[in-house]
Image: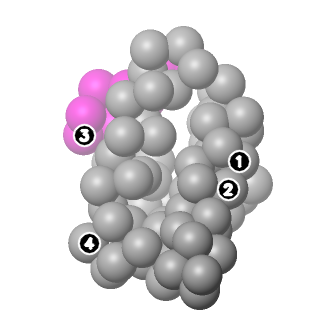
Amino acid sequence: MTLLEWTELVREELGVDGGEPLHKADIDRVLDLARDAAHSVARPAAPLTTYLLGVAVGRGIDPEVAAASLTRLALDQVEDGKD
């Protein structure tokens, strides 16, 4: 099963299967954010950060803008730790 197939199953299970399907770019955005949070903050930050991204998007924030902002925040933690 591919990640795209899995996300469609999850969407159906949660009842959010209406509307436009997710694209590979959407999945990559979430996975990249998870990677950056895990490596720059702590491993448990990955699921928490991506969950909060989902909450923000559900409340109307643009997913691309929100993910970019959170990625910058996570990567800044590495820079702050080097001082």
Mark 3 or mark 1: whose residue is earlier in sequence: 3
Is residue 71 among what the camera can see? Answer: no
- In what quadrant of the picture does the N terminus appear? bottom left
Is label 2 or label 3 in front?
A: 2
**Dot 2 and dot 3 residues touching (CB under 8 Å):** no
Label disc, if present, on residue 57 of the rendered structure: none
Tell me the residue at 62%/64% (across/down): 76
**Dot 3 and dot 1 residues touching (CB under 8 Å):** no
Residue to which mark 1 is pinned? 68
Q: Is residue 4 above or below residue 50?
A: below
Residue to which mark 4 is pinned? 44
Kindly indicate the quadrant of the structure image that contains residue 36.
bottom right
Q: Is residue 51 left or right of residue 41?
A: left
Kindly indicate the quadrant of the structure image that contains residue 48.
bottom left
The kind of secondary structure element at disc 4 is loop
Q: CA distance from mark 4 to mark 1?
A: 19 Å
Mark 3 or mark 4: whose residue is earlier in sequence: 3
